Image (cartoon, grey):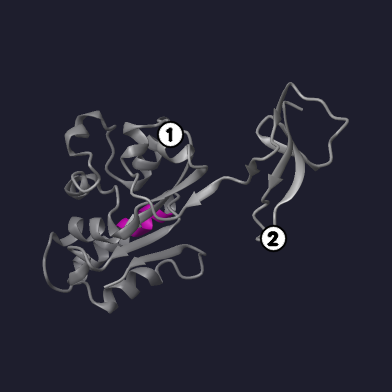
Amino acid sequence: MDLLIRGAAVYDGSGGPARTADVAVTGTRMEAVGDLAGAQAGTEVDGRGLALAPGFIDVHSHDDFAVFLMPEMDFKVGQGVTTDVVGNCGLGAAPFAPARRYLGFFGADHHASDLPDWDTYGEYLDAVDGAPPSLNVAVLVGHGTVRLDAMGNERREPDAAEMARMLDTLAEGMDAGCVGYSTGLIYEPGRYSASDELVGLARLMAGTGALYASHMR
């Protein structure tokens, strides 16, 4: 084994109370949890008085561009976060032309030239893989960005062609590996969308196990 943490208060993610245990790691996998008094490892850490837990999942982040600008992601990893869910509140990273609207919201408007090139969600996911950031990234398709791409900031329902374009973009994102789609119904342009539009998009994901995450009206 490569790493042995001794005597930590282990929170295993089950919701139960902590228990004092040793944890052995080989490579990138935990090999054993329990009383490992006779075991040895290349590196040993005294975990007494410390808490040890699986990595946390930040289910609501806006780090869509930060994963490129600060790939070390110290501000998340330092808090124990090992998986970041981006694309929340309908503010997605693709298609990139309308996504640029949100650079200021993310505090990245003056770093646009430092970002890699992408347009589609598939290209965005490839860019994330190529960075790569120091944590896992799960991506939601942002309804607001998709709507801006299809019909701009119009305060009306989409016509058939615009709805078809939104469905195509959502389908491309899901096929590329996105885990669901999000809406920001208090923000432009999501606030202009009716229930039929939102349900019509969500229906595309029916039976897939994908997520729908909403910032409600």
Decide which of tag 1 and tag 2 comes sooner along the chain.
2
Q: Is residue 27 left or right of residue 211?
A: right
Q: Main secondary structure of the magenta part?
A: helix
In what element is the residue under mark 2?
Answer: loop
Residue 141 location, quadrant: bottom left
| Mark 2 lies on residue | 16
Residue 135, position in %: x, y? 48, 38
Report the disc number at residue 124.
Answer: none
Q: Is residue 198 left or right of residue 3?
A: left
Say which of 197 and 88 sits in front: 88
Badge 1: residue crowd in 10 Å (few <14, some 14–19, many ≥20) = few
The answer to whether any part of residue 73 appears in the image is no
Q: What segment carries the magenta color?
A: 169-174
Marks 1,2: beta carbons within 8 A: no
Residue sitting at 70 percent across and 37 percent down? 48
Residue 32 inside the magenta-drawn segment: no
Residue sitting at 40 percent across and 30 percent down? 131
Tag 2: residue type?
A: Gly
The answer to whether any part of residue 213 appears in the image is yes
Tag 1: residue type?
A: Asp
Residue 171 inside the magenta-drawn segment: yes
